[in-house]
Each structure stands twice: as structure tokens, then as C-alpha cells.
Amino acid sequence: MGEGTNCLSHLNVLNGLITQLANFGVKTKEENKPIVLLNSLPSFYDNLATTILHGKDYIELNDITSALLLNEKMRKKPESHGHALITEVVVGVAKGV
């Protein structure tokens, strides 16, 4: 994912690649998809990824997708709504709330 790419586009590309692999007979385990997604993100998502994974043995792809899309949405809002809400939501996802 490039710095100018939005999360939704990145997720669509990733899903397309997984579909193409399946068409070639390559099976992707469901538990590997979240790790593939997190590892495909640019380094500026490292803190978010760490927060999402903190204390988890397993996380669902939908949890990561939701956190990424929400984070992107909050980044586009004015600073007044800011980082406190993003942190609250991301911590909620990390805790499995």
C-alpha cells in the first residue's frame, strides 16, 4: 500500500489477490489473512497495528478492517475530533470490545 492509497482500495487489491490465488488452487488459511493485511501496510500504520494486536492470540480480519477504515475516516476529520476518539476505538478493538 502506497502512502497515497486509501485503505478501502488497499483492501480491495488484497482481496483480489487472495481471490486470484484461490483461482490458481492456492488456499489461504483464514487465520493468515489478518497477518498478511497488517504486514502489507506502510510503516506509518505500525503503531495502529501494534495496538490492535496487543494482548491478542488471534484477531479476525473484520476487526482489523474496521479499525483501519475507522482510523482513515478519523484522519480525514478536523483535528478537534482528534486522536482521543481514534485511540479509544482502537483500544476497544484491541481489547475485543
Image (cartoon, rainbow, N blue to C red):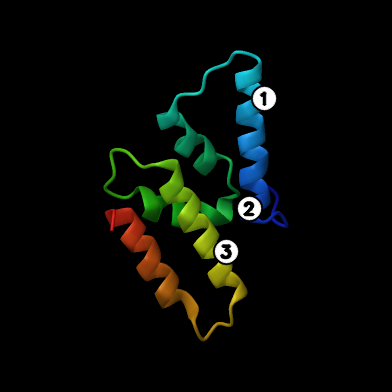
Q: Earlier in the sequence, mark 3 or mark 2?
A: 2
Image location (x, y in percent) of residue 57 = 28, 38
Disc 3 on helix, strand or loop? Answer: helix
Q: What residue type is labelled 3?
A: Glu
Q: Earlier in the sequence, mark 1 or mark 2?
A: 2
Cα separation, mark 1 vs mark 2, equals: 18 Å
Q: Are marks 1 and 2 in contact (CB under 8 Å)?
A: no
Q: Name the residue under label 1.
A: 20
Position of residue 7 in the picture relative to residue 28 (left or right): right
Which class describes the residues within 10 Å of circle 3: few (<14), some (14-19), or many (20+)? some
Q: 33 or 40: which is nearer to us?
A: 33
Q: What residue type is labelled 2?
A: Leu
Q: In the picture shown, does residue 28 fall above or below 53?
A: above
Q: Which residue is drawn at 65% across and 18% down?
A: 23
Disc 2 on helix, strand or loop? Answer: helix
Callout in the foreground (3, 1): 1
Disc 1 on helix, strand or loop? Answer: helix
Q: What residue type is labelled 1?
A: Gln
Position of residue 49 in the picture relative to residue 53 (left or right): right
Image location (x, y in percent) of residue 35 = 46, 36
Give the quarter of the figure containing the C terminus.
bottom left
Q: Residue at x 29, y 53 (%)?
A: 96
Q: In the picture shown, does residue 88 fall above or below 15?
A: below
Q: Do the residues labelled 3 and 2 touch (CB within 8 Å)?
A: yes
Image location (x, y in percent) of residue 11 = 61, 45
Cα separation, mark 3 vs mark 2, equals: 9 Å
Q: Mark 3 points at which residue?
A: 72
Q: Which residue is drawn at 36% across and 47% down?
A: 53
Q: Residue at x 50, y 50 (%)?
A: 65
Q: Name the residue under label 2.
A: 8
Q: Which of marks 3 and 1 is nearer the N terminus?
A: 1
Position of residue 90 in the picture relative to residue 37 (left or right): left
